[in-house]
Image (cartoon, grey):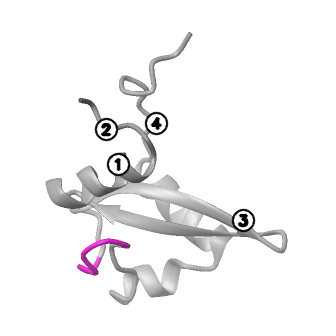
Amino acid sequence: MTDKSTQINAVLNKDLEKLLVKTGQINDFLGGYIKCMYCEDVINYDNLSIMIPSNKGGHTTLHFCCNNPECLSKFRIENGNERH
């Protein structure tokens, strides 16, 4: 059994770019238009913490969470991973 709190999935910068090209979001990312879904800070290579895929109509779009502890806490709460 895998413990979700210890599971780590990582994406290298070069792989992130390929993923963003695939989802059609590379220009927005490089242009500073991708924002954290919680605090709306601009997401970049340095502050990107979590990518959340959303599939609608056969097209995948990524949503992002920055590395701000408050945003990460909101993500954990929304996804039922908050430790008590």
Q: Are marks 2 and 1 in contact (CB under 8 Å)?
A: yes
Predominant secondary structure in magenta?
loop
Q: Nearer the viewer, mark 3 or mark 1?
A: 1
Residue with the mark numbered 2: 82
Residue 55 is marked as: 3
- x and y, in percent, of residue 46 in the image: 21, 62
Name the kind of residue labelled 1 in the image: Ile
Q: What residue sits 52% from the left and 16% below the top?
A: 2
Q: Position of residue 83 (x, y in %)?
A: 27, 31
- Rendered location of residue 64, percent (x, y): 41, 66
Q: Which of marks 2 and 4 is nearer the N terminus?
A: 4
Q: Mark 4 points at which residue?
A: 9
In the rendered structure, the answer to whether residue 70 lies left or right of residue 63 reads left
- Give the amino acid type for the residue marked by disc 2 in the picture: Glu
Magenta span of residues: 37-42
> From this viewpoint, which residue is outermost toward the top?
1
Considering only order in the chain, which callout, 4 or 3, is on the residue closer to the N terminus?
Answer: 4
Asked if the magenta segment contains residue 38, the reply would be yes
**Which residue bears the numbered disc 1?**
77
